[in-house]
Amino acid sequence: MTVHGHGSRPYDWVGDWSARRRRLSPDAVGLRDATTGEAFTYRELDERANATARLLAAHGVSADSDAAESAPNADAVGEAAVGGRVAVVSRNRPALVDLFFATGKTGGVLAPLSHRLAERELAELLEDVAPSLVVVEGAFDDDVAAALAHDACDYDGPVLGLGDSRYDAFDEAVPDDTSAFDGPDLGMDDAHVFLHTGGSTGTPKETVLTHGSIAWNSFNTITAWGLRPEDVTPMVFPMFHTGGWNVLTVPLFHLGAEVVIAREFDAEQVLGIVDEDDATVLVAVPAVLRMMTAADGWAEADLSTLRFAKSGGGPCRQSVMEAWWDRGVDLSQGYGLTECGPNNFAMPEGWTREKADSVGVPAMHVDARVVDDDGRERDQGAVGELELASPHAGDRYWRAPEESRATFGARDGTDDADGEADDGGAEPAWVSTGDLARVDADGYVHIEGRKKEMFVSGGENVYPAEVEDVLSQHAKVDDVVVVPVPDDTWGEVGKAVVQGDESLTLADLEAFCDGKLARFKIPAHLAFVDEMPTSGPSKIDRGAIEERFGEGA
């Protein structure tokens, strides 16, 4: 395969995750399946990967298959070359880990797709990925069959099934040969994983992650968070999400540590894993952390082995953080996105609780800045769009050049401002996150919400995340989202959509916010939901809330 860019030199170790880890710690348990009770050492994981790699190579999921593609004008823009793809629709299962390690060996690309997607979305993603092989867990046979029959999808290749599936069994198709697999030479700029965005607007886009970006995120996570070979984590993110791979799974595989998976999230089960398996690190979205505090076993669970916990995927409410702190767990907030990282920040040693609403300072190999609408860096304390630069950034969106340039910046040695060549591309390609942030006097980064969520009331900018942080501290509020609605006087005002005690009144909220928020930030309307709609890995679906409660509804 042709390779390009700063990581163009091929190394024998690129992609060879399981064999290299097997050599260093063959008898250490790398993966435990809490659903079945099975455990797999790194020797066993490498043997499974070798056999799976032979299956993938036979189906064209490799660097040298007919499905492999060099990026258009790759030598000029430095885009990753892409091997044949395997698309997977499944919950967290050992087979996904086998496919990750195996695609590393063959030079192919793993494209896990969400089993929560609508039929049309799944069909369009399958068409976009253009896989050489589709693998589906039996629970989603009907969904995949419907997507394959949809007008938007032309795939007519092989489909293999996991678990109780009507398709030919994946396990039976894997060869018995577990000897070392002799794969192609790969560079750090070759693609390894496609991960799609959340799809809150339109069909999700596939982000191209290279071997280099995955490795660099792992370096950043290990060095910034202080991960150790003896660490154990329950993996509560789905493996179609960047959290399922890059938050902890791959970094812990890098170290020879242990990852525990299960088909479904169950708060009691995760508490049991922490207690019985002596879990040492935990990362989850705020909703999962809140559900664990509400579980029956919360008070009795032994959490003393947890060295730290982190929240990601949205702001974590103060009440949730305090519940974990009260149990002696060092919980802080993280920040990332599929397109970059996702592990970009860390809390310095000795951080104080006054900084709990921040995501910390940039990790070892991450640059961060806050810019205005013209791309100029803003002064300390001023709110602007957060941009990130790091070798762990994704390469681009697959087959979406305009969207790629808007998010990932210039990659061709030209200057964004005037299009003229610079001095060799020394300026990094900044990833536009779409999130608003500010940097305080101590260098801590505070996320103020999505750029598209900000609204203007009477000429003043209102950041819903700031308002939600205050409202969530009310005793009758379990969760809250603030959306803009039209107003004849002020143009727009906020509506608080609350999950909680419905005896709460707007007057109660106004009184509670007095002295905590400026008057123009206090919501002028109130609505209730029994449960917040979610998308992705238990993330609140703000788009669904705004569609239902916005526009003066």
Image (cartoon, helix red, strand yellow):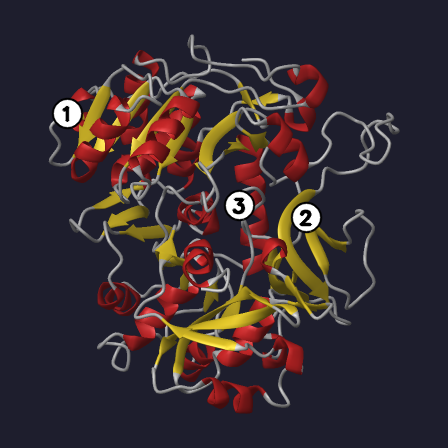
Q: Nearer the viewer, mark 2 or mark 3?
A: 2
Q: Which amino acid, mark 3?
A: Ser
| Residue name at image x 25 percent, y 74 percent | 295
Spatial CA distance of label 3 from label 1 is: 35 Å
Q: Which amino acid, mark 2?
A: Leu
| Residue name at image x 28 percent, y 77 percent | 298
| Residue 231 appears in the rendering | no
- The crowd level at tag 1 (other Cα within 10 Å; few <14, some 14-19, many 20+) is some
Earlier-in-chain disc, 3 versus 1: 1
Earlier-in-chain disc, 2 versus 1: 1
Q: Nearer the viewer, mark 3 or mark 1?
A: 1
Q: Which mark is residue 167?
A: 1
| Residue name at image x 63 percent, y 62 percent | 455
Q: Nearer the viewer, residue 516 or 72?
A: 516
Q: Which mark is residue 388?
A: 2
Classify 283 as above or below 58.
below
Dot 2 lies on which element? strand
| Residue 469 appears in the rendering | yes
> Do the numbered discs 2 and 3 sit on residues whose CB atoms are within 8 Å?
no
